[in-house]
Image: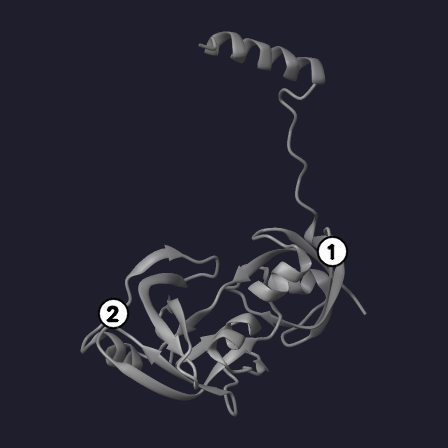
Amino acid sequence: MVDEKLVEEITRRVIEHLGLQGAAPAPPPDIRQGFIPVGISVRHLHVSQEDLESLYGPGAELHPMRPLIQEGEFAAEETVTLVGPKMRCVGPVRILGPVRPRTQVEVALTDGVQLGVVPPVRPSGQLGGSESIIIVGPRGVLHKTDALIRANRHIHMNTADAELLGLKDNDLVKVRVQADRPLVFEGVQVRVADSFVTEMHLDTDDANAAGLSQGDRVQIIKE
């Protein structure tokens, strides 16, 4: 049997020899150089109160499972199944709260392929002419037209950070990824509000293509 105390002592001495003990982690890149964190959005949906009750029954409410980084938003315990035009299914798909005036389903292109559709790329809330989708809940089924999109690449940015970088709401910027597979995202929408926590949102396809993980830093490139 290995002597655990002996292993601990050997490990401590090796760390001291290498000069690693007590080494402070490097600080994250500075926002003043345009560095911001990445949030990776998996497939999800936002629902209206009317549609929530159709899916989960009269008087249904969303039950927070965990908070999201943006103030007041949360991943709910409630999930649904999406069904495409050829009866192909994707699920479970989590509902994000709180409820919204209109139901919006956001997927990556890979999810669309599984469903048998190619959802258009749209900013949040711009649903006119988007794809139709069937949403299945435990108490009901909805057929929603103009509801299914691939969210555009966008940045939530608080007002102070936007002023620091000389940006305003709805500006379009480039974002450089310095990773194993470096690339530059173009046409990234900046959305500015006092309540926002600064973070770039990418879907799982974009994040995987760039080799990014939740919380990694990317850099805004000024034109």
Q: Is residue 140 visible?
A: yes
> Which numbered tag is attached to residue 181?
1
Residue in the picture at 33% in, 71% down: 80
> Residue 116, how many percent across, how many down?
50, 81
Secondary structure beneath dot 1 equals loop
Q: Quadrant of residue 91?
A: bottom left
In the image, taking residue 63 as reference, residue 8 lies left or right, namely right
> Which numbered tag is attached to residue 19?
none
Q: Are marks 1 and 2 in contact (CB under 8 Å)?
A: no
Secondary structure beneath dot 2 equals loop
Residue in the picture at 76% in, 57% down: 182
Q: Amino acid at mark 1?
A: Arg
> Residue 181, how many percent across, how many down?
74, 55
**On-image quarter of the N terminus:** top left
15 lies above or below 134: above
Q: Residue furthest right?
A: 223
- Sequence-first disc among 1 and 2: 2
Q: Nearer the viewer, mark 1 or mark 2?
A: 1
**On-image quarter of the C terminus:** bottom right
> Which numbered tag is attached to residue 61?
2
> Residue 198, how many percent across, how many down?
58, 59
* Front-most of residues 19 and 88: 88
Q: Quadrant of residue 62?
A: bottom left
Q: Amino acid at mark 2?
A: Glu
* Few, some or many residues within 10 Å of mark 2 (<14, 14–19, 20+): some
